[in-house]
Image: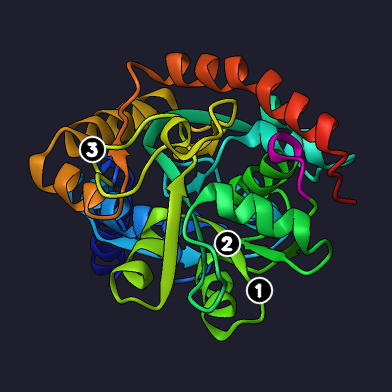
Amino acid sequence: MYARFINVFACGILIFCTALAQPFPNKPIKFVVGYPPGGSGDFVTRTVGEAIAAELGQTAVIDNRPGAAGNLASEVVNKSPADGYTLLVGSNPYINKALYKKLPYDIEKDFQPISLLANGPMVIAVNSSLPVNNIKELIAYAKKNPDKLNFASSGNGSAPHLAGILFNSVAETDMLHIPFKGGAPAVQSLIAGDTQVIFGTSPVVLPQVRGGRIRALAITTQERSAAIPNIPGMKEAGLPDYNISFSFGLYAPIKTPPDELKKIFEAAIKVLKRLDIREKLATQGMDAAPSQSPQDFRLQNQRDAPMWSKLVDASGAKVD
């Protein structure tokens, strides 16, 4: 009896030790994104996140946590174990640092940037009933009809929100911002006529443009995009001083072990170089944008920080 007990105990120890010895990853990887299903953040997360997990031999769990300009998603990841199994897909974190007086996390101390995933221009589109066909006509209409144009965005502090604020500043218009919890509900408000203009990411806006439900006027970068060849850039549209784009990157809790980070980074880079992934992103008006290293990604975010801070300060946009 005693010998049998010893054998059972030994087998239990062996199974436990074998489980501990399994290399990372040995269970599904969760990708937390601060936007609802149907938006650009969700599209990038599912497209790239699922491919990264598959490259690592695992499945992906997509956890949509919309709200507070991505802060809710950031909180979830910050409070998760730093073991490589919970990752954040988000936009440049210095946008929120400029917008919010207080954040429930520290951008520098709580998160480890892994790699940029994708970037691209945003699209300025209008409700089909609005009598404007280009950017010059939109500006003229906005000035002739003050306080009558509302622009939709995916939320306070989002890149589309700041794109609209920047447009008001450069074009000297005064369109009112109406935030939504994600790009999908924002574009639905435009289709319904509850808002008249949208500054939206291309995965959200382009399908509705192609379906004839809304009218695209321009993209938010100075030049045309190869991924969106039929829509003019801002130089061509007549507003050459206007230029802004959006991006999504991959982040982990700061104490995630270096070996796990290395495996995730290498999987991400391999995925982002795949032709099928690049083509899938291009159909939504985005370019795959792998970083040279996690450190390069961190430095790129820091280089962009003054631009976002300056934009937020100039616009007066603050979120408490």
Q: Secondary structure at mark 2?
A: strand
Q: Secondary structure at mark 3?
A: loop
> Which mark identifies residue 195?
1
Tag 2 and tag 1, C-beta contact below 8 Å: yes
Compute the Cα span from label 2 to label 3: 22 Å
Compute the Cα span from label 3 to label 1: 29 Å
The quarter of the picture where residue 181 lies is: bottom right
Q: Is residue 170 magenta?
A: yes
Residue 265 at least partly seen: yes
Q: Which residues are magenta?
A: 169-173
Left or right, residue 62 beside residue 228: right
x and y percentages locating residue 102 in the rendered image: 88, 41
Q: Residue at x 46, y 14 (%)?
A: 295
Residue receiving disc 2: 198
Front residue of this view, candidates 76 and 247:
247
Left or right, residue 107 beside residue 272: right
- Number of callouts: 3
The quarter of the picture where residue 287 lies is: top left
- The kind of residue on which mark 1 rests is Thr
